[in-house]
Image (spheres, helix red, strand yellow):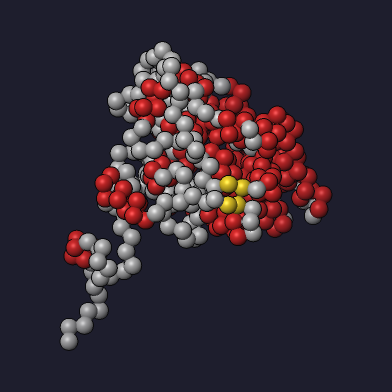
Amino acid sequence: MALLESSKNESIVYENGILYENEAEAAAENCGLKKPLRKIADKRIFEYKWFNMLTIGSLHVQAIYGAYLAITGHAKWQTLFFAYLLYIVSGLGITAGAHRLWSHRAYKAKWQLKLTLIIFNTIAFQNSLYHWCRDHRVHHKFSDTDADPHNATRGFFFSHCGWLLTKRHPLMITAGKRVDFSDLENDAFVMFQRKHGLWMFALFCFILPTYIPYYFWNETLLNAWLIPTCLRYVAVLNITWCVNSVAHIWGHKPYDKSILASQNVFVSIIALGEGWHNYHHIFPWDYKTAELGNYRLNLTTMFINFMAKIGWAYDLKTVNKETIDTRKKRTGDGTETNIWGWADPDQSKSDRAMAKIIFKNYN
């Protein structure tokens, strides 16, 4: 797949920073890229980022030892609870902050919520918020092609973390330069973190999570470093990566069977509601990232709704049921139909025929 000369046309930009259905080719042309007819990765020789490999590898080794200490009862219960709390708040910094608010503009936030989410996101430390959103918007515009930072057609490992261990594909670099990020550049919170990220990440992600257990409840320094810092950090990293890998490989596709993004319950559980990925890639401006609004497998939606009730979040965008049902019937794989139960008019005849009724009353 070769680079083309830059188009004189402006890049296609929408309020939510992503594409609508069937506009990937148009966006590729406007970004000066040639979209492949088939989503199959080009053969390439990878150039490795050795520093990333060493640091990420080292953190994983320490996290494994931290997990051992946590499981075998070497740490205080306060330390384990603190690690879990950090997992939740740093997760929300990614899901409610970097993803739904800043990448997709699926809702708006007042300064109080922005400040909260910036702190949460800094605890998570998955590069600067600006660069996270940049990669994610490019991912949606050119999903599962060589312009996608974590192209799932290259396999599980690459889409999970391999993309961080190798230099970027030239197409991804070109696409990233031509996507509009003016809203991020005009956001004081985003740019403050980008400018002062070095000390912010060091303080909020590593120093404070280690110091607090050590100072306040006399946890050992080793446990404080390995469990609420290393283990928590690596766990949240891998949970986020699962959205790019697991949810692009395994699951069903009730909204569009032609894309790799899939509905994955496991990912939704661990990623605070981010696993309803087939829906999300079709309707990325929906603040729920899912069709259903229940909170059992979507903690992030509950958080945003709570923030809306206290006035910190507003203009929450979602999709009407008619539009969703129409899309399901047109492009879905037929694996998901929302019915209230037996005898619902939408229940298929095949479902009724396959049902097994036990303790049947023959009277």
Nearer the observer, 185 or 157: 185
Corner quadrant of residue 27? top left
Check the image and name the residue furthest to the top.
5
Check the image and name the residue furthest to the front.
9
x 35%, y 51%: residue: 324
Count of marks overlaid on the render: 0
Q: Is residue 282 left or right of residue 351?
A: right
Task: Please say whether residue 27 is visible from this viewpoint.
Answer: yes
x and y percent of residue 122 in the render? Answer: 67, 40
x 25%, y 79%: residue: 359
x and y percent of residue 182 in the render? Answer: 57, 30
x and y percent of residue 347 in the render? Answer: 25, 63
Q: Is residue 28 above or below residue 276?
A: above
x 19%, y 63%: residue: 349
x and y percent of residue 49 in the render? Answer: 56, 21
Task: Please say whether residue 45 is visible from this viewpoint.
Answer: no
For the C terminus, give its image quadrant: bottom left
Q: In this view, does 125 lie above or below 30?
A: below
